[in-house]
Amino acid sequence: MVSEFDVIDGIVARLGAATDAPWVSVGPGDDAAVTSVPPGQDLVSSVDSLLADVHFPAEAPADLIGYRSMMVSLSDLAAMGAKPAWVLVSLCLPNANQAWIDAFASGVADAAHDADVAVVGGNVAAGPLNVTVSVHGFVPSGEALLRTGAQPGDAICLSGPVGGAASALNRVDLAASVRTTLEGCARAYWLPQPPFELAVSLRTHASSCIDVSDGLLQDLGHVCRASLVGANLSSESVPLAEGAELRDGLCGGDDYVLCFTTGDPQFAKAHLVFGEVIAGEGIWLDGKPADASGYQHF
Amino acid sequence: MVSEFDVIDGIVARLGAATDAPWVSVGPGDDAAVTSVPPGQDLVSSVDSLLADVHFPAEAPADLIGYRSMMVSLSDLAAMGAKPAWVLVSLCLPNANQAWIDAFASGVADAAHDADVAVVGGNVAAGPLNVTVSVHGFVPSGEALLRTGAQPGDAICLSGPVGGAASALNRVDLAASVRTTLEGCARAYWLPQPPFELAVSLRTHASSCIDVSDGLLQDLGHVCRASLVGANLSSESVPLAEGAELRDGLCGGDDYVLCFTTGDPQFAKAHLVFGEVIAGEGIWLDGKPADASGYQHF
């Protein structure tokens, strides 16, 4: 019988150097991890749960599940202008299949490497497949980027094209994906790359920011309500991923690009502008009220 | 249809003041929370997942599930000598039943009040019932209490009696428990009270510490292996909860009291001493090798 502790030991071994960083004094192996926050920095923290057959196909390769779970969760840090620092990973899995666990840990380690975060602890339990990642990053005190700062006249921008993941859901057998041959929209779905470097420059140039996880219109709606403004969008300016249709880009989820507003026209010019913040409320697309329904969880 | 956002709004409303604390600058409602760590303090962090019909009966009252999930997770902070500060709560639930969600949030809020922590964010998803709590606390830099410091000659102590929760699992209909009438071992199971105040004094008096979650012998075994020592225990000195048998106390889990070692005889005298750290390895009970099997997750 494989015990919980064997599973944890196997994961920690596979993570290797990914459990360490200069701000980590105690990593996996005790009751809790011990970290420090650099002077003059705030801590930015979020948690996401990804469930089998809700957020990813249960039969997909475990390394892709591990990689995607990390990046989807870390995307929330980018949306706040924070630099990712460390994560805790809680894994529920139906049975202790060693090959699956090794592959999952490899995917987590690769994402940790790509995002420059340490995996400082976690939890393993027997149950329906569920990956919950608590993510933590640093931002200079008081500089976190919120949803509340959009002003009428600001340009509305995207950090990259949208609709790729939604298009993959419709067109690709995601469960049969293999990491080494991923291309196009399947790559957008399985290996999302939140723009961590851009996020740092957004601290000083953007007035508000959100990550596009549930669909562009729905997520932009959160910004508008938080900032007490409206938005005027042009459908032909929405940057679509290869193969994606407009509906994928506006209402599909899972893209994990950033949608931000900026009052700096020079900064806006260097990015993908697709609309303008307006006084009032509501989102207008090509002059008509937009249907903002994105992903509904229940 | 109830949306994810309605569920979250309902929970946040029910949490009320429990979302705030002096170290929280952005609580629930943005992509992530923003907190600060007081100067001279380290951050101590852990995550636990509690699953329906694995860690609690699915049909139990939601307020008890919420309360217990918080305290079980916060226990890891006490085991490190940390003062609880804030948590993130990720909830997966099969359907959006408003009465259940309100009761769950009330239980979480009550635990937050009792432990003096803020609930700064979370996540809600549709899926098999699973409560994952990421817990975070403060400890003076470098003073976190680890599993590695036990020395031969140290007294081995407990912060309270053990076996109550295991006894409840055998003798009480936990799903039919009602919070207002909880007594004895059912109370120990549903309303664990990690000794947060004692944990602070352990920083200076204890040489090692762990919380008893998977069974006393198994958890003490982790300390012995981490500290490269053995333990000599006396069965008649093990403090048992009312109605608990020795096996409940030694091998039952879920107690969430602290097991600690101390080289300070005066300090030990004021606590429940049931053994001594010895050179070598292994745990001996009344002179014979002890069977350390506790809760096995797989």
Image: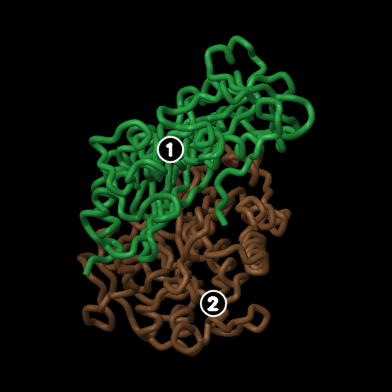
Chain colours: A brown, B green
Q: Position of residue B223 (x, y in %)?
A: 66, 34
Q: Position of residue A291 (x, y in %)?
A: 25, 78
Instruction: Say which amino acid is labelled 2.
Output: Glu
Q: Nearer the viewer, residue A6 or A114?
A: A6
The extreme top residue here reads: B266
Instruction: Say which amino acid is labelled 1.
Output: Ser
Judging by the rendered image, the residue that carries numbered circle 1 is B167
Which residue lies at the image location 38% right of the left edge and 46% below the top edge? B120
Which residue lies at the image location 31% right of the left edge and 49% below the top edge? B175
Splitting the image into 4 quarters, where does residue B221 fall?
top right
Which quadrant of the rendered structure holds the N terminus of chain A? bottom right
State the CA–CA distance, disc 2 to disc 1: 39 Å
In the image, is A133 to the left or to the right of A276?
right
Which residue lies at the image location 24% right of the left edge and 82% below the top edge? A287
Q: Is residue B175 above or below residue A174?
A: above
Judging by the rendered image, the residue that carries numbered circle 2 is A59
Q: Is residue A201 visible?
A: no
Disc 1 secondary structure class: helix
